[in-house]
Amino acid sequence: MNLIDGKKISEDIKLEIASEVEKIKASGGKVPHLAAILVGNDGGSLTYVGHKVKSCEQVGFKSTLLHFEDANAVTEDFLLSKIDELNKNNDIDGFIVQLPLPKHISDQKVIEAIDPKKDVDGFHPTNVGRMIIGLPAYVSATPAGIIDLLDRYKIETAGKNCVVIGRSNIVGRPVSVLMSQKGKDATVTIVHSRTKNVKEICLQADIIIAAIGSPEFVKGDMVKNGAVVIDVGTTRVKSDQTKSGWKLTGDVNFDEVAPKCSFITPVPGGVGPMTIVSLLKNTLLAAQGKIYKK
Ligand code: GUN
């Protein structure tokens, strides 16, 4: 069994991005600039956005955080006007609006207000649609991170049976599309809450991508010997083994499944660290005008 070390790979990629930034600087170019909008004080979102800003510093990007702490004071119109400002601000190459937003603001309306050329989260329907038909697009962070891990570990995907568990817009559905595209060439099955015979389908899988957010859903008897297992789950569950009283738990029962695998991602330290790297990669692409011409 080989552990897929997302932390190590993400650090390698950050060094590669930092060296690109050095090259840009040396040739007198403009340093990539990422902006983030955060509404309210949700603990998880504060942590995520904090990591994003810190990662920008690590690779030499400029970053701007627009934090509106009083969520009740932020109307949808106000947020849309801020997005319009960022769309028009030529110094900013890409930006994100941290989700979820307060209930009185429509996530979808906000996502669709972002200029697709600056949508480095890859959530705008234009980017999702372009990705699906194989045009250059910003691909969202988790699916892109999963593909990077498979590539870096040179895991063969062509002609393999890939079972994706979960059909969310941010992970299951896009990663199922990416795995079936030319270059990856897997035969993909999506398993969801209405699927019959989940266990039998999973037992056919050469590659399982578990993204349902149900702790330890994938058990040892659902996985064939030699399978590759990618665990996207990050559910906080109570634990008496940690100081905080909580631990992050994946969608895979690691102790049961790992001994059967050729490769498996741990939680934490697998897919998670790759997601910020995907955002940094998209921001670099935005600054370089490689997806959409500047
Ligand atoms: N909330 C949880 N994950 C994400 C993400 O990748 N982007 C944004 N904008 N919000 C999130």
Image: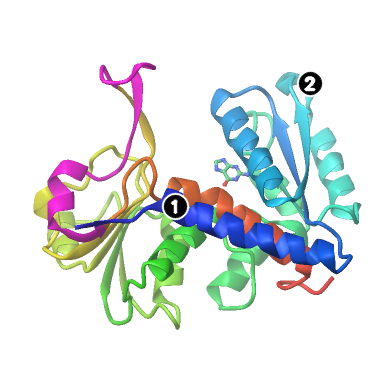
Residue drawn at x 62%, y 28% is 46
Does the rendering let one see residue 225?
A: yes
Distance between the alpha carbons at the discs numbered 2 and 1: 41 Å
The residue segment tinted magenta is 239-263
Horizontal side of residue 23 vs 107, given as left or right: right
Q: Quadrant of residue 141?
A: bottom right
Residue drawn at x 14%, y 62% is 203
Horizontal side of residue 69 vs 186, given as left or right: right
Badge 1: residue crowd in 10 Å (few <14, some 14–19, many ≥20):
some
Q: Is residue 103 above or below residue 232?
A: above
Of the numbered discs in the image, which one, if any, rests on residue 225? Answer: none
Check the picture and name the quadrant holding the N terminus: bottom left
Residue 224 x, y percent position in the rendering: 12, 62
Residue 179 x, y percent position in the rendering: 40, 71
The residue pinned by badge 1 equals 8
The residue pinned by badge 2 equals 73
Check the picture and name the quadrant holding the C terminus: bottom right
**Count of number-bearing discs:** 2
Is residue 244 inside the magenta stretch?
A: yes
Residue type at mark 2: give it.
Ala
Q: Is the CB atom of the residue marked by disc 1 within 8 angstroms of ligand 1's nearest atom?
A: no
Q: Is residue 86 above or below residue 206?
A: above
Q: Is the CB atom of the residue marked by disc 2 within 8 angstroms of ligand 1's nearest atom?
A: no
Residue drawn at x 47%, y 64% is 148
Q: Is residue 64 above or below residue 92?
A: above
